[in-house]
Image (cartoon, rainbow, N blue to C red):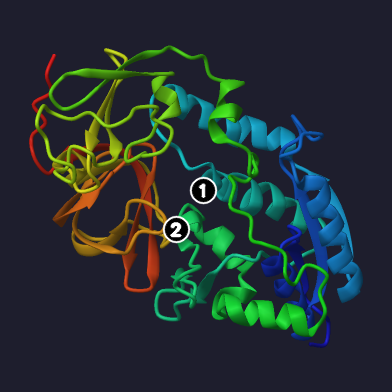
Amino acid sequence: MSKKQRVVVGLSGGVDSAVSAYLLKQQGYDVIGIFMKNWEDDDDSEYCSSNVDFVDAAAVADVLGIEIEHVNFAADYKDRVFAEFLREYQAGRTPNPDILCNAEIKFKSFLDHAMRLGAEKIATGHYARVRLNEKTGLHELLKGLDSSKDQSYFLHRLTQAQLAKTLFPVGELRKTEVRRIADEIKLPNAKKKDSTGICFIGERPFREFLNRYISKEPGPIKDEKGRIIGQHVGLSFYTLGQRQGLGIGGVKEKGAQRGSGEHSPWYVARKDMAKNTLWVVQGHEHPWLLSSALQADDVSWCAGHAPTNGLLANKSRYRQADAACDFTAAPSGFHLHFPQAQWAVTPGQSAVMYDGEVCLGGGVISASAPAVAQPLQA
């Protein structure tokens, strides 16, 4: 390059963004690192790792010989991500804040800041890829080559303008290769564990966190026969398909034999907000946990346009295998019908559409149709 292109990399303190910065520098870019601070309400708590993460990011920048800047987006995050997160939970839905954080903070506030620094592009350590379709002139968001780490699901709300300015250097690699590179070049965080918590919550117990912001309204827990078998602490604290933390033991009929299914684990099957009742069923494959269709609203198409009606693939939750579905556009979003019923389709989560390895976009699940009728007892 006669004049080095400037790329601003979001350095999180993790190994993926660190190797991304290294690869870009090897390719001849002028690389600058930015550490984003998105949460500061409890910076001194045992669960907040942002200070440790910044130290790790700064150590990586030092090894790579690049500048790093600490930028605080906490006010933007609270207004544009966290407020929506709380609204959804209070309405009884289960939102995915990482998806909104990507669209509103990492690829909006961060992108705008990088452009002010004279960057041509930004880069992150996400496992995804961007490809320019020469025929259409549109940018395509592709799955990461490491299928076990693919993060295109979390990026489906990005716009064409955002994709055009974004690089995902590790999207072409497997995680084992990323770790190998980090070890080879002696990055200080080469063996650092991947973070698993929601971006602003960290690894803390989730219910403990929500307790600070959402009021509790206890109510009955009922089984499919309408029997009250426990008490919930507030419907906002539960999600469909949840197994842990229900606080109920086995309930069995008289004379039931061990192993008959009466001793199977309990799962959340439905939340009745009007009656403040939590409905639970026993067994992972209980029919009440299965849906044959869903409706999604609040759509966003990273492909640049909605897909045409017909057969596509869908993920209605992260870590789920692609599910064949029949896609039909609707005035406010789209409908999906599944030939094979899907497990624990959850309002507030995202239904993300795929055509092979290409992520098309998606919407927020507003309703689902049960695979079988649910004649709930009063």
236 left or right of 7 in image: left
Residue 99 circle label: 1
Q: Position of residue 39 (x, y in %)?
A: 72, 37
Q: Position of residue 98 (x, y in %)?
A: 55, 47
- Which residue is more in the foreground, 198 or 133? 198
| Kind of residue at disc 1 | Ile
| Kind of residue at disc 2 | Tyr
**Residue tagged 2:** 153
Mark 2 Cα-neighbour bin, 10 Å: few <14, some 14–19, many ≥20: many
- Which residue is more in the foreground, 52 or 334? 52
Residue 115 circle label: none
Q: Quadrant of the C terminus?
A: top left
Determine contact: label 1, label 2, CB under 8 Å.
Answer: yes
Q: Looking at the image, is mark 1 or mark 2 earlier in the sequence? A: 1
- CA distance for labels 1 and 2: 8 Å
Q: Tell me if residue 187 comes above or below residue 108 in the rendering.
A: below
369 left or right of 211 in image: left
Q: Quadrant of the N terminus?
A: bottom right
137 left or right of 170 in image: left
SS at circle 2: helix
SS at circle 1: helix
Q: Residue furthest bottom?
A: 1
